Amino acid sequence: MPGLLFPRALRFAWAAALLLNLFAAAPAWAQAKVVQTPYKNPKALVDIFLDDPAKLGAALYWVRSLVNPLTEAPYSMFPEDMSIIVLMHGTEIVTLAKKNQERYQEVLQRMRYYADMGVKFKVCGLALQDYGYSAADMQDFVEVTPSAITELMHWQNQGYALIPAVVLDKKFSIEQIR
């Protein structure tokens, strides 16, 4: 019996040494590489067309995701270095009506913050008519355009990148799907 134990122990030691060498020689788990794309003076047109004005808060995260990284280090762009237009032509235009100011106070504050940074907020004149509004009914930082579709075409012809603010119904929390 003692002769059988030694070869088994030797085999075990050899396997353990092999595994240790394998793990010691293997590189640490690789990770993603962080890059700093050399962004230059962006020209962007954020298209917002929502089926529910309650989704506007989520749509404004598209503006945040565009402006905040560019104004922070390492880019540290000044707002005047960026040309950003937000075009609204869905149910969300009710949030810009002066009469609804109290109801939509939070999103109005966020839009005003970005407007003060130079982001232009434009509203489709045809949609205003559909809702029974006029330019006089809108907040003072809003510009009324003749039509959202012609405005989209115009700014894209001027070299602006079109960014559709897609807002889906959230079915899962981040914790559930992570």
Image: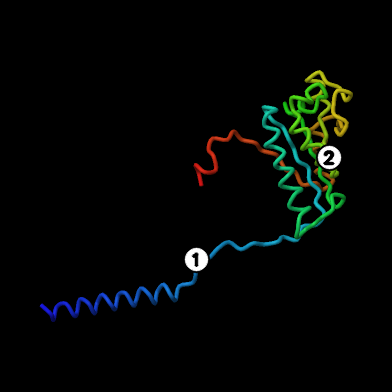
Estimate how packed mark 2 is, as few (under 14), some (14 to 19) or many (20 or more) residues with alpha carbons within 10 Å.
Answer: some
Where residue 154 appears, x then y in whole percent?
84, 40
Where residue 22 appears, x then y in whole percent?
40, 74
Image position of 21 with respect to 40: above or below: below
As helix, strand or loop, the secondary structure at mark 1 comes to loop
Please count the marks in the image. 2
Q: Which residue position holds label 2? A: 115
- Identify which residue is drawn at 45% across, 73% down: 26
Image position of 153 with respect to 8: above or below: above
Picture quadrant where residue 90 is located: top right
Q: Could you tell whether 172 is left or right of 114 in the image?
A: left
Looking at the picture, which amino acid does disc 2 mark? Ala
Q: CA distance from mark 2 to mark 1?
A: 44 Å
* Residue nearest the observer in this picture, 166 or 18: 18
Where residue 37 appears, x then y in whole percent?
72, 60
Query: What's the coloring here?
Result: rainbow
As helix, strand or loop, the secondary structure at mark 2 comes to helix
Where's the N terminus, which quadrant? bottom left
- Identify which residue is drawn at 84% across, 44% down: 117
* Residue nearest the observer in this picture, 35 or 115: 115
Asked if labels 1 and 2 touch by Cβ distance under 8 angstroms, the answer is no
Circle nearer the N terminus (2, 1): 1
Which numbered marker is on residue 29?
1
Which numbered marker is on residue 37?
none
Looking at the picture, which amino acid does disc 1 mark? Trp
Image position of 154 with respect to 124: above or below: below
- Identify which residue is drawn at 26% across, 75% down: 12
Q: Could you tell whether 1 is left or right of 74 in the image?
A: left
